[in-house]
Image (cartoon, helix red, strand yellow):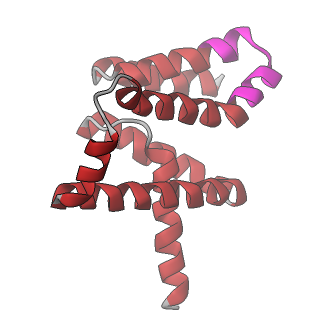
Amino acid sequence: MSEYLTLGAVLILGVIGHNMTVVYAALIVLAIKFFGTSEMLNYFGSHGLNFGIIILTAAILVPIANGTVTISTIINSFKTPIGIVAVIAGLLAAISGGLGVPLMQENPNVIPALIVGTMAGVFFFKGIAVGPLIAAGFTYFVMALFEYFK
């Protein structure tokens, strides 16, 4: 029962914060929880991240498909300071996300903290809930630094 209350609170906070992404996500999970089986919920939990990344990546590739981004604009992105910083930021985000997955698998106790931090960023700073994966990667980096300087 507490999981319904917690998800309901997330839903209400999403509505109050006018963050429809959180509202839709909470509704999807509540619907699967209410109407589905635990097997379906577990499947969504273990494969949903991959589905989300596929959809997100496909959406990012649309400007290439519709001709807005061409080979020439891609090459030109390496010629400006903001383009170079964006390439480096994309590289670091991808590495961070890649390191975040094993961290969450090996240390599942970090997941609630990542969720709270991400939801705080979404609710109070108008962020987007792609944060847990990258936050896990940043956590990995910070923990690795602590281990290095120990």
- Left/right of residue 36 with respect to residue 26 in the rendered view: right
Relative image position of residue 86 (x, y in whole percent): 28, 54
Does residue 30 belong to the magenta stretch? no
Q: Considering only vertical position in the picture, is 74 above or below 94? A: above
- Residue at point 32%, 26% (across, down): 67
Give the magenta-colored segment's residue range: 31-44
The N terminus - image quarter: top right
Does residue 35 belong to the magenta stretch? yes
Q: Considering only vertical position in the picture, is 31 above or below 123? A: above
Relative image position of residue 45 (x, y in whole percent): 68, 33
- Residue at point 48%, 81% (across, down): 145
Relative image position of residue 35 (x, y in whole percent): 71, 8
Residue 80, quarter of picture: bottom left
| Number of on-image labels | 0
Name the dominant secondary structure of the magenta segment: helix
Of all residues, the one furthest to the front in this rendering is 72
- Residue at point 49%, 35% (across, down): 57
